[in-house]
Image: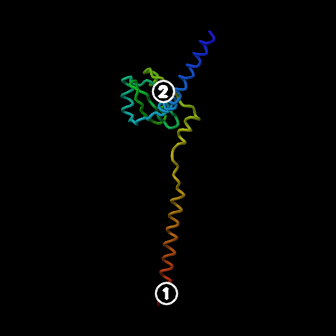
Amino acid sequence: MNRLTTALTGLALVVCLALAPLAPAALAAQAKVDYTHESEAAFEQQLASKQIRSAIVNKRLRTVRVTLKDGTHVLGRYPKHQAPQTIARLQAQGATVTVLAKKQAEQEAGKKPKHHKIRYIAGGVLIVVILVVGAVLLVNRRRRRD
C-alpha cells in the first residue's frame, strides 16, 4: 500500500512538472480580453435580442463591457445618468451584471494619458523670445550701418 501511494505521488509530480510551462500561457490568454467598441444602437439591438450573457458596468467611465452568448467581447457606452436604468434592463434580459467598485473604476479611469499643456505654453514663450531677440539684433545691426 505504501508503494502505491509513493508511485501515485511521483506520477502526480511528473504530470504537474510537465504541465507547468503551459500554465502562464493559459493564464495570459484568459486574463487579456480584447473588447471591440460598439455604438449605442448595436448595444440596444443586442439587448433586445437577448444576446448578452454578462456585463461589467463602470459608472465612472459610463461604459459597459459585454460578453455575448457567442463568446465575443464588446465595449459600449451609455448616456449620462442612465446607470440604474441600464443595469435594470440588463438584469431584466437575464444577463449577469457586475458593477465595478469605486476604487476599481477609478483605476481604470486613471489610465488615460495626461496632456501636458505647460509644454505647449513654454514652447510658445520660447518661440516668442527667439523672435523678439532676432528682431532686436536685426534692428541694432541696421542702426550700426547708418
**Residue 62: x, y in percent?**
48, 36
Measured Cα–Cα span from mark 1 to mark 2: 76 Å
Residue for badge 1: 143
- The residue positioned 51% from the left and 26% from the top of the image is 19
Q: Is residue 6 left or right of residue 23?
A: right
**Residue 143: x, y in percent?**
49, 87
**Residue 45: x, y in percent?**
36, 28
Assign a secondary structure to mark 2.
Answer: helix
Give the amino acid type for the residue marked by disc 1 in the picture.
Arg
Between 32 and 15, the residue placed more toward the observer is 15
Residue for badge 2: 87
Q: Is residue 40 left or right of residue 128?
A: left
- Where 15 falls versus 133 (above or below)? above
- The residue positioned 48% from the left and 23% from the top of the image is 96
Q: Which mark is residue 63?
A: none
| Tag 1 and tag 2, C-beta contact below 8 Å | no
| Mark 2 Cα shell of 10 Å, populated few (<14), some (14-19), many (≥20) | some
Between 140 and 29, the residue placed more toward the observer is 29
